[in-house]
Image (cartoon, rainbow, N blue to C red):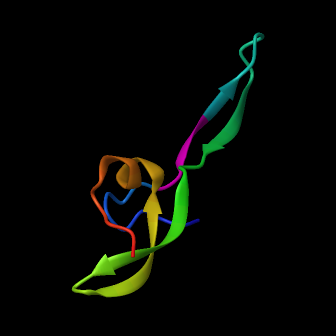
Amino acid sequence: MAKCAVCDKSVHFGNNVSHSNRKSSKMWKSNVKSVKVKVNGGAKKMYVCTSCLKSGKVERA
């Protein structure tokens, strides 16, 4: 799974808990996109989560 290059956000693990309190494993995937980003005047392809894109932490190329 991809990891955000800015904030290191990746997958999270936990349990699905049913009404009868049975547990099964669950994985939450963060919304990470492959984006061309401006780095040192040039364009570079990186994995960035959508919350970093929305907040303006990176600038698209």
**Span colored in magenta:** 10-14
Residue 48: percent from left, percent from top: 43, 63
- Residue 30 located within the stretch drawn in magenta: no
Query: Dividing the picture into quarters, in which one does residue 1 lie?
Result: bottom right
Question: Which residue is the extreme one toward the bottom?
Answer: 42
Describe residue 59's horizontal placement relative to residue 3 as left or right.
left
Residue drawn where x is 37% and y is 85% of the image: 43
Residue 38: percent from left, percent from top: 32, 78
Whether residue 38 is situated above or below residue 7 in the rendered picture: below
Query: Dividing the picture into quarters, in which one does residue 14 lie?
Result: top right
Q: Nearer the viewer, residue 41 or 29?
A: 41
Q: Main secondary structure of the magenta part?
A: strand
Residue drawn where x is 59% and y is 49% of the image: 29
Whether residue 58 is situated above or below residue 54 in the rendered picture: below
Residue drawn where x is 68% and y is 29% of the image: 16
Describe residue 8's horizontal placement relative to residue 28 as left or right.
left
Task: Report the number of numbered marks.
Answer: 0
Question: Which residue is the extreme one toward the top?
Answer: 19
Describe residue 57's horizontal placement relative to residue 27 as left or right.
left
Residue 5: percent from left, percent from top: 37, 68
- Quadrant where the C terminus sits is bottom left
Residue drawn where x is 75% and y is 18% of the image: 18
